[in-house]
Amino acid sequence: MPSSSFSPTSLKTKLANPMKKTVVLYPCLAVSHFVPMMQLADALVDEGYAVVVALIDVTMDDDASFAAAVRRRAASSDPSLITFHTLPRIDDPPEMPIDERFLLGYFELVRRYKNGLLELLRSMPPRSIHAVVMDALSNEALDVAKEMGVPAYTFFAWSASALAVFLQLSVAASVCDEGRPVSFKELGDSHLDLLGVPPMPASHLSREMLEDPNGEIYQAWMSSIGKNLEANGMLVNTFVSLEARALGALNDPQFLPGCEFTMPPVYAVGPLLVEGPPSGDTKEKHGHECLAWLDSVGCHSEEQLKEIAVGLERSGHRFLWVVRAPVRDSTLALHADPDLDALLPEGFLERTNGHGLVVKEWAPQVDVLHHKAIGVAGVPMLCWPLYAEQKMNKVVMVEEFGVGVEVVVECRQQGLVKAEEVEAKEGERLRARMRALKEAAAMSWNQEGGSSRTAFGQFLLDLEGVGIGQ
């Protein structure tokens, strides 16, 4: 993590221009959420804002990948424009088991860091803070911004389609049937007809929404989703050409009838992506072994890894495969170093040497997709949902966007996909649709009226209009 020298008492001197308009970003402890938020930071800097990134104190033992991502970004950022500040570590942080109770622990962690965030905001120069933008999963911090009289916005790294589903069902969950809370699990595979998305089975909802409606997990998740309605606005990492239906629903004044809160404005400001690396000596410039080779939170079971290996070998295609430690006893071994020789079929690594590369745990995903040898930025996707809102995303990718093919699971209990399915070919219709969306994504941030650039500009105008209530 960044140096602990960024203390509340010294932050005023750390800012190059203490009176410059400043936006405080409060990311979630997940790389997939942190990276796009840092691209938002760059966009704010380009518009003349200073950015302070407030971080919950996480050691390498807590989450090595997140801490490493923060270090990389802090090292590459201009400290006169983007300042990283680690909040004082709390005593006895709550447990965050890697199972269905993870979010309970995380929400409690954010609650217990509210005082640290409040002290940070109080330490900053008066009237310099124009807004706090927090990850949607860290929205307990809305209370802190409200106490300071600072405009607060939530940032969604997930899709607008998922957001539309979550918000509608959180409102529905607040309505009881004869005093009995709504149970979505009891609906089974019955289809839900919701605004902004194609019909989908209730069983495709995220795990938290299928919990006992009287239980802690369900209630905490629904409460967290609903709390986003208290924000001044919502920033979503998507673009209009991709999710016009969902965004149209979210911006409809009648989207949440009967809700006690007015639906705040939604700004589609994506795709927030790191620019791809230039061609050339990739290993020297970017370090990671898989990028050099190209020049010449889902985990699978051990059984599934073997099936994937068989399918890849049979296909004869060149491949790059990132293998994470497998699931054991319903627990994700986040930091275990996978033993490839034990996990993969005997002789697989030797037989595929030269046309395949297997990498342990992590690869710089965006850089890989941009690499000239890959050519997969803008091609169809195999949709293989494992956790969170991925089943919902699968429905939208396959049925709404028409850019994905569902991987059909042979056995729902074990979630095993046979090698034959891994070999399946893509259709030209999907490729054509994906190429069109790739071009639309590039145009969304175009200087001349791109939808996301326009939405970001509207966000800045609204931000100035809200004013500073300090």
Image (cartoon, helix red, strand yellow):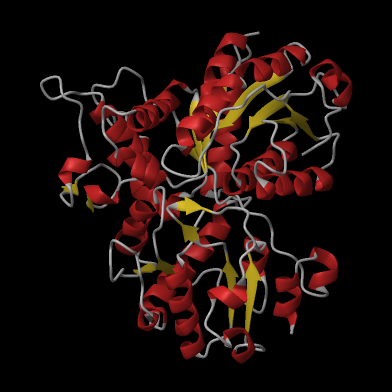
Instruction: Check the image and name the residue furthest to the left.
Output: 178
Q: Residue 377's spot in the image, x, y percent? A: 56, 69
183 w.r.t. 431: above or below:
above
287 w.r.t. 25: above or below:
below
Q: Residue 108's spot in the image, x, y percent? A: 52, 25
Q: How many marks?
A: 0
Dividing the picture into quadrants, the one containing residue 264 is top left
Asked if one can make out residue 394 in the rendered structure from this viewpoint, the answer is yes
Residue displayed at 64% across by 50% down: 447
Taking the image as shown, residue 273 lies to the left or right of residue 295, namely: left
Taking the image as shown, residue 365 lies to the left or right of residue 184, namely: right
Q: Residue 406's spot in the image, x, y percent? A: 34, 68
Q: Quadrant of the C terminus?
A: top right
Asked if one can make out residue 320 in the rendered structure from this viewpoint, the answer is no
Residue displayed at 35% across by 45% down: 206
49 w.r.t. 8: above or below:
below
Residue displayed at 39% across by 65% down: 383
Taking the image as shown, residue 298 lies to the left or right of residue 390, namely: right
Q: Quadrant of the N terminus?
A: top right
Q: Residue 240's spot in the image, x, y percent? A: 44, 49
Dividing the picture into quadrants, the one containing residue 70 is top right
Taking the image as shown, residue 20 lies to the left or right of residue 403, namely: right
429 w.r.t. 314: above or below:
above
